[in-house]
Structure formats: structure tokens, C-alpha cells
């Protein structure tokens, strides 16, 4: 048993895909860590730029050539987020504007107007999740402890992603949703959840949570991250592609790395932050 596990572990370490994923992860974490240390406004500007890239990646996912309509739609959506970003940086008071609400509502209206630019209804629904995710992310980052809150989410989603992948490769046998994502296994998912809950218990001070409540939050973040991954896999399957893009070696596209946040951030904000 131990020998078989060792052989699988060694094979995983020798796998080119795994080495690429590891190298890319280190580069991404380094960039985000430097930006995190410097703090705002660099961090929110970096994430706002990623927003634009994600929108174009979604449009190009099925091989569609970006035309003027796609470009204009994404330009309007980016402009809406940019105005929201400026209003937060300059601390403008719009009176009847309620934080992100009006900007998010406007971006959703714009997206709905251009719904025909999407390949199918699944892609359109996913695009709205992306909009909600980025607006709420900026709203979180502008809070007094926003950087810590986001770091907490990043650490837990990354833990779930890494250990679910490793667990699935080493001992994964039972497929959870083979028709949507053949790589997702019950064993890998459970291992990812165990490590995510464990890490949550270790970093509860980062967001001033009770250790047991932090473990509960860690569990739900792990589950929601998994659901975000499944949702993105459904989008990719609906347009017949394996990866959302090829920007990140070993990982695919940006959405392949950000899929967990698409579902986690709205729920995290709604149930943990908004009530306070």
C-alpha cells in the first residue's frame, strides 16, 4: 500500500503538467503577494485589469473571433467597474448611490443587453457571476480589513484546489461528475475539504473568527469553490473546450484559476460581511 502510494507520488512529481502548475502557482502567488504587501490602490488596480482579461477570455473560449460588438460590450463593462473603482479611491459621495449596488446593476443591464454575444445561456449566466464577483471583490478590498479578508479566502480556495488535485491524482477513483468534469473525484474532494478546514482553523485570527466558526466557514468555502469549478467546467463543456485559455502554463486560462472565487465571494460577502 505504502509502496504503491510512493510510486504514484513520484509519478505525480515527474508529471510535466504538475511541474507547470507548481511553477505557475509560485509565479502567481509571488505577484499577488508583492501587490498585497504594497496594498491599495495597486492591488485593486491589478484585479480590475484582470477583470478585463477574464471578460475577453470568456468571449474567446469557444474560438469566436472578437468583433466590434464584443469589444464594445467589454469596454462598457470595464468602464463601469473603472468608474466604481475611481469613486472608491476618491471616496466620492453620490448621495443616492448605495456603494457598489448601482454600478453592479448597471453592469448587469449592459451585459443583458448584449446577451446575444454569448455562445449559450450557460455562458451568459456565468458572465453575470463574473460581474458580481469582481464588484463584490473590490467592495471587500476597500473595507478596513479587506486585504486580510481576501487573503483568508485566497488561502482557503488555494488549499482546496491544490489538495483536491493532489488527492485526486494519488488515490482518486470515484468520479463525482464525470459528464461535466472527469478529473473530479470523491477522494480528492474530501482530502481538499479536510486540508481546507485544517488551514481555516490555523488562520482564524486573520479575520477575527472563533476557531470553530472559522472551520465551518472553511468547509463551506471548500464546497463553494468546488461548485465554482463545476460551474466553469459546465461552461467549457457547453462550448467544447478543455481549458478556458492558455495564458497560464499548466493551468489553462485565467478562469481556470479563478473559477472558485466566482461562487465563493458572493456567498462570503452576503453571509459573513454584509450582516455587519
Image (cartoon, rainbow, N blue to C red):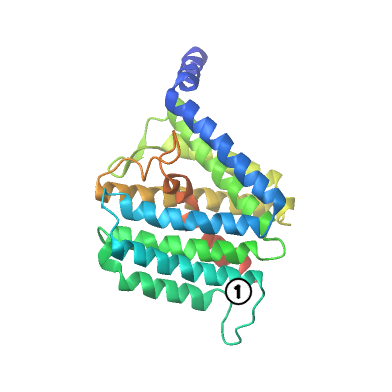
Q: Name the residue under label 1.
A: 87
Q: What element carries label 1?
A: helix
Is residue 191 left or right of 143 when viewed as pictured?
Answer: left
Q: What residue is drawn where x is 57% and y is 87%? A: 96
Q: Residue furthest top?
A: 3
Instruction: Say which of 156 and 141 sits in front.
Output: 141
Q: Residue 24: image x %, image y %? A: 52, 35
Q: Residue 228: image x %, image y %? A: 43, 52
When the figure is inspected, residue 6 is found, relative to residue 161, above or below; the finding is: above
Q: Quadrant of residue 276?
A: bottom right
When the figure is inspected, residue 157 is found, relative to residue 187, above or below; the finding is: below
Q: Residue 208: image x %, image y %? A: 74, 57
Is residue 229 left or right of 69 when viewed as pictured?
Answer: right
Q: What residue is drawn where x is 36% and y is 69%? A: 111
Instruction: Say which of 25 and 237 sits in front.
Output: 25
Q: Can residue 36 be seen in this view?
A: yes
When the figure is inspected, residue 74 is found, relative to residue 101, above or below; the finding is: above
Q: Which residue lies furthest to the bottom in this view?
A: 96
Q: Residue furthest front?
A: 68
Q: Residue 28: image x %, image y %? A: 56, 41
Q: Is residue 171 visible?
A: no
Is residue 144 left or right of 123 when viewed as pictured?
Answer: right
Q: Quadrant of residue 241?
A: top left
Crowding near pointer 1: few (<14 within 10 Å), some, many (20+)?
A: some
Q: What residue is drawn where x is 51% and y is 56%? A: 49
Amino acid at each position: 500500500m505504502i509502496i504503491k502510494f510512493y510510486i504514484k507520488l513520484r509519478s505525480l512529481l515527474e508529471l510535466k503538467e504538475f511541474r507547470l502548475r507548481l511553477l505557475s502557482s509560485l509565479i502567481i502567488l509571488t505577484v499577488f503577494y508583492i501587490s498585497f504587501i504594497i496594498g491599495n490602490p495597486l492591488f485593486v488596480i491589478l484585479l480590475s485589469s484582470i477583470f478585463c482579461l477574464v471578460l475577453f477570455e470568456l468571449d474567446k473560449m469557444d474560438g469566436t473571433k472578437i468583433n466590434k460588438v464584443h469589444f464594445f460590450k467589454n469596454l462598457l463593462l470595464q468602464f463601469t467597474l473603472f468608474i466604481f473603482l475611481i469613486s472608491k479611491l476618491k471616496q466620492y459621495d453620490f448621495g443616492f448611490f448605495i456603494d457598489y449596488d448601482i454600478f453592479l446593476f448597471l453592469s448587469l443591464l449592459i451585459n443583458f443587453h448584449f446577451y446575444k454575444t454569448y455562445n449559450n445561456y450557460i455562458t451568459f449566466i456565468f458572465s453575470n457571476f463574473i460581474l458580481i464577483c469582481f464588484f463584490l471583490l473590490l467592495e471587500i478590498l476597500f473595507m478596513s480589513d479587506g486585504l486580510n479578508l481576501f487573503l483568508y479566502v485566497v488561502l482557503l480556495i488555494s488549499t482546496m484546489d491544490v489538495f483536491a488535485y493532489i488527492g485526486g491524482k494519488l488515490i482518486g477513483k470515484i468520479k463525482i461528475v464525470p459528464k461535466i468534469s472527469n478529473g473530479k473525484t470523491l477522494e480528492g474532494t474530501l482530502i481538499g475539504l479536510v486540508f481546507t478546514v485544517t488551514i481555516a482553523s490555523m488562520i482564524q485570527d486573520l479575520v477575527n473568527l472563533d476557531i470553530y466558526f472559522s472551520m465551518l466557514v472553511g468547509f463551506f468555502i471548500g464546497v463553494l469553490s468546488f461548485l465554482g469549478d463545476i460551474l466553469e467546467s459546465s461552461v467549457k463543456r457547453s462550448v467544447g473546450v478543455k481549458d478556458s485559455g492558455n495564458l497560464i502554463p499548466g493551468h489553462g486560462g485565467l478562469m481556470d484559476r479563478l473559477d472558485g472565487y466566482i461562487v465563493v465571494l458572493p456567498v462570503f460577502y452576503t453571509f459573513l460581511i454584509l450582516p455587519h
